[in-house]
Amino acid sequence: MRTEVCETFGIEFPLFAFSHCRDVVAAVTNAGGMGVLGAVAYTPDRLEEELRWIDAHVGGRPYGVDVLVPARIDESAERAGRGEGGLETMLAAVPREHWEFLFGLFERYGVPLPDFEKARRGHSRGGTQVTREGAAELIEVSLSHPIRLIASALGTPPPLMVDRAKERGVPVAALVGTAEHARRQAAAGVDLIVAQGGEAGGHTGEISTMVLVPEVVDEVAPLPVLAAGGIATGRQMAAAMALGASGVWCGSVWLTTEEAETPPPVKAKMLAATSRDTVRSRSRTGKPARQLRSAWTDEWEGPGSPGALGMPLQMIIAEGAMRQINKVAETGNPGARELANYFVGQVVGQMNAVRPARRVVHDMIEEFADAVARLNAITGAH
Amino acid sequence: MRTEVCETFGIEFPLFAFSHCRDVVAAVTNAGGMGVLGAVAYTPDRLEEELRWIDAHVGGRPYGVDVLVPARIDESAERAGRGEGGLETMLAAVPREHWEFLFGLFERYGVPLPDFEKARRGHSRGGTQVTREGAAELIEVSLSHPIRLIASALGTPPPLMVDRAKERGVPVAALVGTAEHARRQAAAGVDLIVAQGGEAGGHTGEISTMVLVPEVVDEVAPLPVLAAGGIATGRQMAAAMALGASGVWCGSVWLTTEEAETPPPVKAKMLAATSRDTVRSRSRTGKPARQLRSAWTDEWEGPGSPGALGMPLQMIIAEGAMRQINKVAETGNPGARELANYFVGQVVGQMNAVRPARRVVHDMIEEFADAVARLNAITGAH
């Protein structure tokens, strides 16, 4: 394909794949698209390890990194995270009624309680990475690798990120859910805007891709815009580009690929789910994020719930809980299977078979060409 | 354009225009698309009058009628509507706390109270048309005119509608918000499915157009599918057809045309609104319907609200209230202006100038061609 984005990034197809899994990132990059590693769950050391692995597997082909830099976070939690004690202090900031609700949930669903502090320390920094300081460390690690894109998934990237990236000649992308945010991102010096519709998985607004993309394209022209949300097939990719997008940014579709590290009970749920089986809920991160509807989301939105906390506190308790739920769900525990979920968009209804990531890329490109041919047949006679 | 839908309906562009305004219906039909009159607000006599006017203004060109036939309605209200007293009996079924909330709302916003019974009797049958019997009368009036399409906006069309339409050789269309509903509609004998995404104005589900259209197309193939929701420009029309739709069904975009009978204060709000200024609320009809966010929706969703009633009771009190609010808003009453709203989709953000309906059609077709040309430029080099 010939697009400005393909030329800028040295890729064959303007197809960006957001994934927390390095294998997916490498597979899409090697298939002619651009893999972007979601770094939010990693410690700096772990991120370093993942990026080294990717460097060793893409033969110099372009890939990127996505860091979650929230514009507004719970400042008391941030202060706690910065102070002595770190995670322990943050855990202490979780109100008693939230702990009680959570422990009650585990009890009612017959899932053994995790040791929150131990579980979190053993695996990651548990939400502290979504403070500004945490994000800064991840940015530094990322820029020490030959990445070709650094993205900010939430809010305007801080000047630190833009400045440091520009020093290294690395383009900066930012996800937006409204035209107004896109204008602010453009003013902040972002090189590539990802306009993400409300049907997308993860943190998302309410304006649909069909409405948002042309608005954002017109707002920030001539900056290139990628469309995100509702895109898992070549028809949807063609639709996005008919709307004026210069390419697409897909996240959900990789979660059921062969390479994905999605916990098996969640993967099975996704393969069985329809497009009606997602919900936009604050129950995993404290901010509205689209995810599989499950007993977890139902209980947090239900009448007995104390309501989700803000970010990052809700993220800390939800991540610790989900790690345990997934572990126990794999043993067949029915309550844990009911609770298990993950971020995913409405396209989950079209994710019905496990494919290698490379095959997803090729299927999309082939179907894209078919869609364009069909449009030509319609106008050809005119 | 050459599509199956164009051939079936004898139209130049597969662009269907839903409007309650006969002038819009005629203008779109005369411009090469297909106008579809929304008949829900009319008495049978008034509908007869409107269709005669359209017949006299389209020179035999094709147009259609849309009737609201709810699958499930409040049966006690339906019984009341059928019994002696009609509207009066239905009004009596509205709980006291809802009247009190409504009267309090008028008082707080400084709007004189309407005489609900008188206002409603003077203008229409106020919600009784959304009973099954009410719909049957409108269907009979419609089929006595040379219409080329009869559509059911809500729920599976009753066998009566399908059978009577087929006797007359009139194709039947039905709006759906999920693939499952589309399958049921196809089984009920519908000829044309309108897949309406959650970004649409009026009664709508939650699945976005980008996700819903390919699902429905695959579900009911080879039945033709029109895409609805988020479509007000040629880029969006091209996107919809890239998704596999055989055409598009637009409603919101006509509300700010020259011909539209949209109350001036509401039209002004729409021209100023962004795509963020709509909300899916039960406050106008009792079923979730996307509309302009206003003091009306905020108050009904707010803490002091008794909650919306079901359909048609909520529709009865909301229509009576809105008629008064619009009348008073036109005199400049600030409270009435705050309350005023109307059904509209997220595309309201792109409705920034008043154009004749014919011009909207031509702009869409021209932009459609541009979008296809851009897609060709992308694939051409491949």
Image (cartoon, coloured by chain):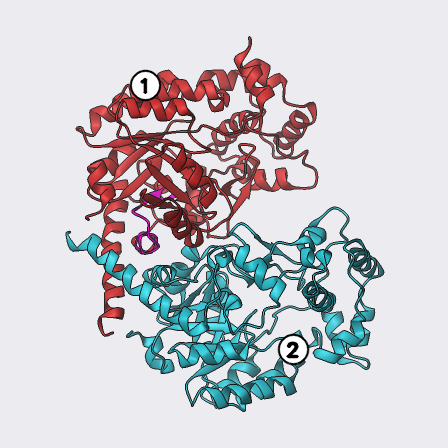
Chain colours: A cyan, B red
User: What is the number of the mark on residue A178?
Assistant: none
Side (left or right) of A154 relative to A339: left
Q: Residues within 10 Å of mark 1 (few under 14, many from 20)?
A: some
* Quadrant of the rendered image containing residue A159: bottom right
Side (left or right) of B36 relative to A191: left
Is residue A137 magenta-colored?
no
Residue lying at 62% horizontally and 33% vertically, measured from the top left: B308
- The answer, for residue B173, to whether it is visible in the render is yes
* Residue type, numbered disc 1: Glu
User: What is the number of the mark on residue A132?
Assistant: 2
Name the residue nearer the viewer: B338 or B348: B348
Q: CA distance from mark 1 to mark 2?
A: 66 Å
Residue A50 at what x, y percent from top left?
57, 85
Q: Is residue B57 above or below residue B236?
A: above
Name the residue nearer the viewer: A188 or A207: A207
* Quadrant of the rendered image containing residue B109: top right
Task: Tell me the residue that label 1 is attached to.
Answer: B48
Q: Residues within 10 Å of mark 2 (few under 14, many from 20)?
A: some
Residue B254 at what x, y percent from top left?
34, 41
Q: What residue span does the magenta drawing correspond to?
A: B237-253
Side (left or right) of B58 relative to B259: left
Q: Chain of mark 2?
A: A
* Residue type, numbered disc 2: Arg
Name the residue nearer the viewer: B240 or A253: A253
Q: Secondary structure at mark 2?
A: helix
- Outermost residue toward the left in this view: A381
Q: Chain of mark 1?
A: B
Q: Secondary structure at mark 1?
A: helix
Residue lying at 50% horizontally and 44% vertically, measured from the top left: B205
Residue A92 at what x, y percent from top left?
83, 70
- The answer, for residue A246, to whether it is visible in the render is no
